[in-house]
Amino acid sequence: MSASVSPVPAIGIDFGTTNSVVAHTADGSAASLVDFAAPDGTGAVFRSALCFWQDDAVRGALEHEAGPWAIAEFLGFPQGSRFLQSFKSVAASTTFEHAQIFTKRLRFEDLGRMFLNHLATHAGSVLQNLPERIVVGRPVRYVGARPDPALAVARYDAMFAGLNRKIHYVYEPLGAAYSFASSLSEPATLLVADFGGGTSDFSIVRVSAPDAPRRCVPLASAGVGIAGDRFDYRIMDKLVLPLLGKGGTYRSFDKVLEIPGGHFADFSDWSKLALMRNKRSLDQLAKLRHAATDPAAIDRMIAVVEHELGYGLYEAIGAVKRALSSQAQAEFRFDGAGLSVAAEVSRTEFEGWIAPDLAELDEGVDRVLARAGLAARQIDHVFVTGGSSLIPAVRALFERRFGADRIASGNELTSIAHGLALIGSAPDLAEWTVGEGDEA
């Protein structure tokens, strides 16, 4: 952010695990969000999802859609579709080679190009004439036990190759930091915590006075492979799955055994549940129901599989998580075809379930402070962004360290793209980009 050189047009792309957002500086100054068409209207947030189905008119051909349109296609015809969400999470995985979609094998970059094409189509004319500068956000730490950041960048390069522009990669929290810094009127040291769907990233930036030749200087970044998806699954695992038989028992001859956890493995992702609706899986569940000491619980699990209720279950989980951000107690309730379940949950219970995750987030903050060579008292502002920043226990983690008066939030889903576009239009863009092998 420089006060002495005029900015240039740029595009900032926040390709997120759960959602994607694009911003542009059409006139080389203020950044604006790009709106996308959706079945229920327009908006700046586009779900990072793909849906595939076979084209009956052409043998072996695939039709596909992305974003909210992909969700609509899947819900309309789940058994004839293949749904992919959060595919960004395999970008750095050395074990992922391709996704098998009907008869096609699609690599990460194939999926990414399809997604980008639909993203551009639903943006109308805004993304048809791209400027020379395109800035893409990347996590500080990729998801996975042993992620390969160089592999991820190679896949990103292939994914964005069709744009015919040089791609500049910037850590996602630095985008949010740049966006927040644009609103400051005095020098400050700023820490940004970005809680996405798959990862939580932290960056520290030094902000100079508005008239300084170089307004912002990045100091350090760190990341943790934990974020909103993990919190959702904690609710599924601790609150919902026990209603569907997890932790229950079944009779085998003269023994009473615990139901194997493998029956519930696909509940970690609602889109996987559609694949359980096959004769083999349903026959196994029918046998389990016959032997279960609580057959009604297995009936509820069978209803989820038979009636494709996974998406609705996760939507209800999201509603509970949001409710617990403002309430001490909330009710999980889901009513669908063949299934009606309800359970009370307290914020205290939820915070107990995510306590191990919060401890890892705390360690991530330790790392970024250590890399910047700073103590908590030397941070003037803390900007928390991303959907999970609204969880009181997450916010309390920062308030304990830095004090409530230094915490700010807002534009939880759009601040990264906004800042990336501003960085792209600045003359010191090179100072913000990261190398292909960088990992924090």
Image (cartoon, grey):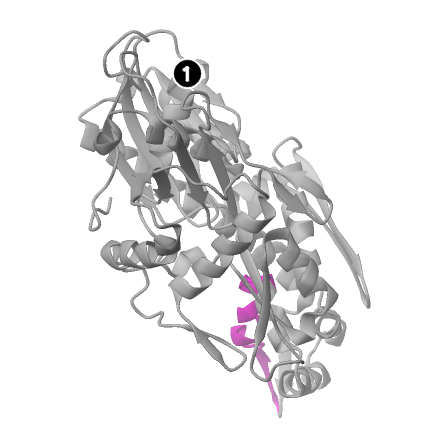
Tell me the magenta residue range: 254-270
Task: Judge from the rendering whether residue 82 lies leftward or rightward of residue 364; answer left or right.
Answer: right
Give residue 319's position: percent from left, percent from top.
Answer: 67, 44
Q: How many marks?
A: 1
Residue position marked by numbered label 1 in the rendering: 406
Q: Quadrant of residue 431?
A: top left
Give residue 60's position: percent from left, percent from top.
Answer: 56, 82
Residue placed most toward the observer, 164 or 233: 164
Question: Residue 147, can we see it?
Answer: no
Task: Confirm whether the magenta stretch covers residue 255.
Answer: yes
Question: What quarter of the picture does the N terminus occupy?
Answer: top left
Q: Quadrant of residue 403?
A: top left
Relative vertical location of residue 279 with respect to residue 46 in this rendering, above or below: below
Task: Judge from the rendering whether residue 274 lies leftward or rightward of residue 18; answer left or right.
Answer: right
Task: Judge from the rendering whether residue 244 lies leftward or rightward of residue 22; answer left or right.
Answer: right
Residue placed most toward the observer, 100 or 163: 163
Residue pictured at 63% horizontal, 47% vertical = 318
Say which amino acid is labelled 1.
Arg
Give residue 244's position: percent from left, percent from top.
Answer: 68, 67
Residue pictured at 31% horizontal, 54% vertical = 157
Relative vertical location of residue 365 with respect to residue 236 in this rendering, above or below: above
Residue pictured at 65% horizontal, 45% vertical = 37
Task: Confirm whether the magenta stretch covers residue 364.
Answer: no
Residue lying furthest bottom in this view?
253
Give residue 175's position: percent from left, percent from top.
Answer: 37, 32
Question: Residue 218, can we see it?
Answer: yes
Relative vertical location of residue 193 with respect to residue 71 in this rendering, above or below: above
Relative vertical location of residue 345 with respect to residue 150 in this rendering, above or below: above
Q: Quadrant of residue 172?
A: top left
